[in-house]
Image: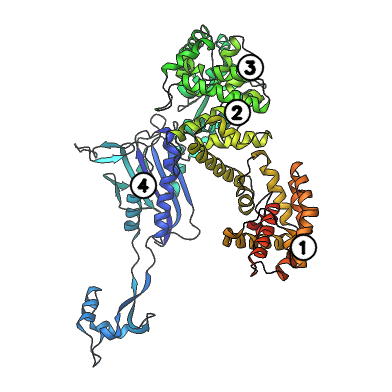
Amino acid sequence: MSSAPLLVELLTEELPPKALKRLSVAFAELLETQLRNGRFLEASSVTTRYATPRRLAVRITGVKAKAPDQPFTQKLLPVAIAFDAEGRPTLPLMRKLEALGLSEADLPRCKRESDGKAEALFIDGVTAGQTLQAGLQAALDQAIAQLPIPKVMRYPVPGGYYNDVSFVRPAHRLMALHGDHVVPVTALGLDAGQTTSGHRFLATASEIVISQADDYEAALETQGKVIASFDRRRERIVEGLQKVAGTARVVMSEELLDEVTALVEWPEVYEGRFDPAFLKVPQECLILTMQQNQKYFALTDNEGRLIERFLLVSNMHTQDPKEIIGGNERVLRARLADARFFFEQDCKKPLADRVDALASIVYFKGLGSQRERVDRLVKISQTLAALLGADAEKTARIALLAKADLTTDMVGEFPELQGTMGRYYARHDGENAVVAQGIEQHYWPRFAGDRLPESLEAVCVSMADKLETIAGMFAVNNQPTGDKDPFGLRRAAIGVLRMVIEKNLSISLSQLIGAATDQRDVSSAVELFFYDRLRGLLKEEGHATQAIEAVLTQKPDAIAQVPARLNAVRTFAALPEAEALAAANKRIVNILKKNAESVTHAEAQPALFRDDAEKALYAVFHERLNGEVETAMQAGDFTKALQVLAGARREVDRFFDEVMVMADDPAVRANRLALLNEIRQTMNRVADIAMLAG
């Protein structure tokens, strides 16, 4: 047999649903990589992965029964060592040949070539390709060992006593088919065969024999009532949900869809109902109850209001699903009753009366309680409100109540609802609408691309919350390291930056950091942290790295102006004068860096000028460009500030053509360095244009 499709399946007990998709992808990729590295696959080979609650499987087309032989050239020894003075093979050469399974009879096959240092003796040979059995065995062993298993189970092999096998769940069958031939490999104490099992209740037979690898998916579906493909099963669920929902909208997150897909082998969608009286409870609570506790899909009307219908995905097909629907309705009724009880109990105590209870909740070691954190949050929020012109009273009220819902039963049951429940309870308590919305929105943005808080007061508290977290964690030495960021400090910093930039807030980075901390060592580290996050944010938005560095090297304090500076740099870089001016600026920077101790004049003195070229350069900057650049900077027109510099190209070029900066006269030399220093400062008001030089 030359090449044929290969099928590998591990049949197990029910796999963890939240990990199934990840396990499936890893299993397929690991097997494919190992077989490709072993030269068993053709260039056109295609890998298809399968995953159900009880199996991981892979089918790969164009798999060779034997890897091709591999020619090789082996260096034996330097010729000077391989042969004696009479040209006879030496003992070291004979030992080398023997170690390779060769003899003196193989010497005629050897050739003499230079190894780059001296003449050496080489021999050509061919390494026989591995059989598929050997290659698949190694690939299977490595794939199983490297699977991202969330929690390993230990269990005995079939008929065994000791728990000497480790896997995500006990495995019961192994199938390995190359075309229509079983590949005799083993894994997890199992020998490969060609049988599998279908749906526990719907399959037409307890065992399903797969005749050849290409029959796998169809045989499982027709005989086993199992849709083996994770993606196909997911698509069927989505189609079923939308069909049964009718004109209603299905609330279906990607995570819930993946989890439900991992729970069923033959999905059927049924509709259930609940008492409309439960709709008096905030719909976020009801939806989370359905999703997290029961894996149901909630339905809303076209305005997004929850309705008293829900959809469930069953693993059973039946002509009369009344029993299935009725049982699920009873279970949901109890869950919704719990949610209603939590909500009604929480409403009995106003949020304002809950604030002091935060003293019993530890925030973090070294940072006190949540009550102490709220005090810091109020202080920072008030500082930011004063700087931005927000309503001081409403801002302080949002900050005071922001964390109060952490003491409620509902948030205790569903931590994801913190902030959301605070808004509901605040409205119930009669709080101002801006305050109620601010309690929810102070957590925004929660992830990349999430919405920003709407009111300026909510923005102040949101930034304060994130700044307090960053400053506090830096103070107790809990900065992010590598790819680890357990406290979400990077996400918090990006949230602050987005609010400042996208809402064009007139507040500086130093003011933001100063509002949250007065420790200089922490402030410096936090500042560097913010600039690093800003680099990443700007790169994601598509700005060129060179332009980003040119702007951020200046450490601009007005963060909201950074995009305008970048746009100005892009416009400037397109000017015909840009390359020459950037190169001149780079030259100026290098000269000043090498002669920093000689820059003794704050300003250049015209009386010390000797050459017309330096006089002309001084004149063009002092009489025209300095003023024009300053005016443009004051107006925030960074493009104009850079464009006017193009008018100095002739004078700059002439200066470097005709003037010797490092003159013998110390006074003249220092004066010319002072002139270059002034020019550098003017040219780099927007960005370090020297960094634009090639």
Q: Is residue 72 visible?
A: yes
Circle 2 SS class:
helix
Percent coordinates x, y for residue 8 in the rendering: 38, 48
The disc, 2 or 4, on the residue closer to the chain's N-terminal end is: 4
- CA gap between label 3 and label 4 equals 56 Å
Q: For the residue marked with disc 2, what is the amino acid?
A: Gln
Q: Mark number for residue 615?
A: 1
Residue behind mark 3:
393
* Disc nearest the viewer among 1 and 3: 1
Percent coordinates x, y for residue 603 in the rendering: 69, 54
Label 4: how many residues lie within 10 Å, few (<14), some (14-19) or many (20+)? Answer: few
Circle 4 SS class:
helix
The disc, 1 or 3, on the residue closer to the chain's N-terminal end is: 3
* Disc nearest the viewer among 2 and 4: 4
Residue behind mark 2:
242
Q: Is residue 209 above or below residue 615?
A: above
Circle 1 SS class:
helix
Q: For the residue marked with disc 4, what is the amino acid?
A: Gln
The disc, 2 or 1, on the residue closer to the chain's N-terminal end is: 2
Q: Is residue 576 visible?
A: no
State if disc 3 and disc 2 touch (CB < 8 Å): no
* Disc nearest the viewer among 2 and 3: 3
Say which of 375 and 432 sits in front: 375
Q: Mark number for residue 146?
A: 4
Percent coordinates x, y for residue 268 in the rendering: 50, 28
